[in-house]
Amino acid sequence: MTSPDVLVRVATARGVTTLTLDSPHNRNALSTALMTQLLAGLGDAIADETVRAIVLDHTGPVFCSGADLKETAAAYASGAVPAGMLGDVLAAIWECPKPVLAQVGGPARAGGLGLIAAADLAVCADEATFAFTEVRIGVIPAVISATVLPRLHPRAAAELYLTGDTFDGRRAAQVGLVTASVPAAELDAAVRGYCDSLVRGAPGALAGAKELLRRPGTAELRAGLARLSALSTSYFLSDEGREGVTAFREKRLTRWVAALDGGSAEQAG
């Protein structure tokens, strides 16, 4: 019997469990398999009394590219997309009684930004890039809003949600998406520094401090995620969403962009 691919690597040392997204072939996209393994890793780390903090890391140059659009396109035939599972992952990170720190060494898009925002702390490389690209493929950043909007400054949220423009690590720190942005060569040391501080906290006190910090609270977050997951699904299944996902996978312009110049939807350049 063939064992499933390992998409999330788990390592524990000195009170810290590191969960490493390890699906570089698709830029650590949030496939059902990866999210299932991530939830399992989180559950095990929470249950392990020796673990004081959790780091969310990645292999390859990209932290997380967001939804697995290949899987999403295949799911269209059944009239379902895996937005609900993303909500479960974000809730698990947000509600985790142990501090979660995201280590972001490369680009993050869409759902990847939800993971970063769900973490209690996030440190990125200055060179890392971010973008809420959903509107450009005919959908909206619905599910991730549950964790992203409590972090972002309102004016920045409006700009970044509506334009889909790319921004770097320094801007991510300025607008509240990450805790700190550092040169890439200093990223590992910065994360170790935070972990060294976190493991000095008493487990019960850390959990209690997290409870004070949670806004929205657990019940409010869960209710919001259920509503946002349904909203996300409706956009992915809309005509615009189907066209956007298809255009992205075919590496061509969407019809609404091509129409601006009266051209075809062939990918330019």
Image (tube, grey):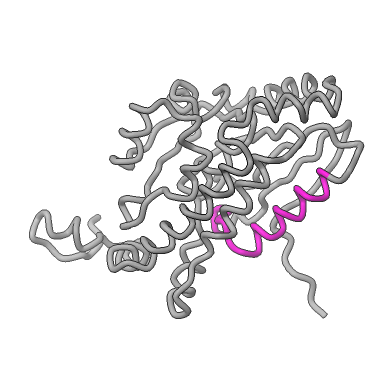
The location of residue 252, given as percent across then percent down, is 28, 62
Horizontal side of residue 268 vs 77, given as left or right: left
The location of residue 55, given as percent across then percent down, is 72, 37
Examine the rendering and report whether any part of residue 250 can be seen: no
Q: Quadrant of residue 117?
A: top right
Front one among 129 and 36: 36
The location of residue 191, given as percent across then percent down, is 70, 26
Q: For residue 36: magenta?
A: yes
Horizontal side of residue 132 vs 197, given as left or right: left
Q: For residue 224: magenta?
A: no
Q: Is residue 131 above or below residue 212?
A: below
Quadrant that contains the N terminus: bottom right
- Tell me which segment is drawn in magenta: 26-46
From the image, give the main secondary structure of the stretch colored magenta.
helix
- Total number of numbered discs in the rendering: 0
Front one among 69 and 162: 162
Q: Which residue is most to the left?
A: 262
Q: Is residue 71 above or below residue 116?
A: below
- Residue visible at 31% across and 33% down? 159
Horizontal side of residue 40 vs 238, given as left or right: right
- Residue visible at 61% across and 44% down? 219
Front one among 129 and 50: 50
Quadrant that contains the C terminus: bottom left
The location of residue 146, given as percent across then percent down, is 50, 42
- Residue visible at 30% across and 67% down? 243
Examine the rendering and report whether any part of residue 206 can be seen: yes
- Residue visible at 57% across and 56% down? 30
Horizontal side of residue 255 vs 181, given as left or right: left
Q: Which residue is most to the right?
A: 50
Q: Quadrant of residue 216?
A: top right
